[in-house]
Image (spheres, grey):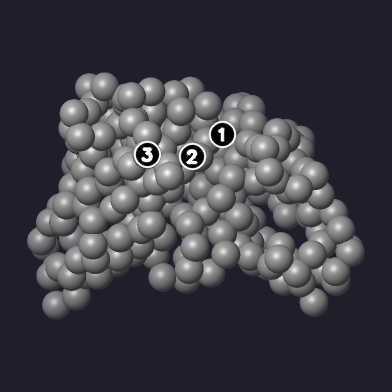
Amino acid sequence: QSALTQPRSVSGSPGQSVTISCTGTSSDVGYHEHVTWYQQHPGKVPKVMIYDVSKRPSGVPDRFSGSKSGNTASLTISGLQAEDEADYHCCSYAGTYGYVFGTGTKVTVL
Amino acid sequence: QVQLVQSGAEVKKPGASVKVSCTASGYTLTNHYVHWVRQAPGQGLEWMGTINPSGTGTKYAQKLQGRVTMTRDTSTSTVYLDLSSLTSDDTAEYFCASEVADTFYFDYWGQGTLVSVSS
């Protein structure tokens, strides 16, 4: 099972929107509705920002949103803030193969 | 306070094995799958495998089949990761993470255990 493909980095100014893509296959992202996005600050453990493609856990700001089309899932951060600067990892359930993570994206707030 | 507490850093030689523990504090893992995820320096996350709530079932990443074993002691809410035949490619931070059964995301994470493999 190959890692899901994410852009290495994205950047935006405070207040702008950025979108991170996560491309898999018809065996993982394209087949299952269990895509999760994790935020990871340097030296910290990952934190769930979006689960089941588009659901937000309690406490996660509503400027974070998720979607999916075909084999590609996306995370959008609207109204970018300084504290959003972090690494973001997508993860998809892959049935008999278990789970597969993305390659990771560094978000920089300019 | 709900947390997963992992054992300390390990330094191993190539060919050796390592065993990392993960103990729940502030909650029990009665209805939780526990997953192991690793992160090589400067790299992304890699799912290694999972063990079911009763400890009777495991699923491992294909690339690690034959080298990885996950076990759990339900009486102490502790899960163990065994990885054998270590190479330098296994140098990474190893995290345990819990999933409430069939929710398909990892809500609580351990603090990480650094495993360094070097001759």
- The label on residue B106 is 2
Residue at the (60%, 27%) spot, across then down: A32
Q: Is residue A28 above or below residue B13?
A: above
Give the image location of residue B105, x and y in percent: 52, 36
Q: Nearer the viewer, mark 3 or mark 1?
A: 3
In the picture, which quadrant includes the N terminus of chain A? top left
- Read off the residue under disc 1: A28
Mark 3 or mark 2: name the one nearer the start of the chain.
Answer: 3
Q: Secondary structure at mark 3?
A: loop
Farthest residue toward the right?
A15
- What amino acid is found at the position of numbered circle 2 in the picture? Phe
Give the image location of residue B72, x and y in percent: 21, 34
- Read off the residue under disc 3: B26
Q: Secondary structure at mark 2?
A: loop
Q: Is residue B99 left or right of residue B96?
A: right
Q: CA distance from mark 1 to mark 2?
A: 17 Å
- On the question of residue B49 being in view, the answer is no
Residues packed near mark 3 inside 10 Å, few (<14), some (14 to 19) or many (20 plus): few
Q: CA distance from mark 3 to mark 2?
A: 17 Å
Residue at the (15%, 68%) spot, across then down: B12
Residue at the (24%, 39%) spot, across then down: B79
- What amino acid is found at the position of numbered circle 3 in the picture? Gly
Q: Residue A78 or B110: which is nearer the viewer?
A: B110
Residue at the (23%, 62%) spot, across then down: B8
Residues packed near mark 2 inside 10 Å, few (<14), some (14 to 19) or many (20 plus): many
- On the question of residue B5 being in view, the answer is yes
Residues packed near mark 1 inside 10 Å, few (<14), some (14 to 19) or many (20 plus): many
Give the image location of residue B15, x and y in percent: 11, 62
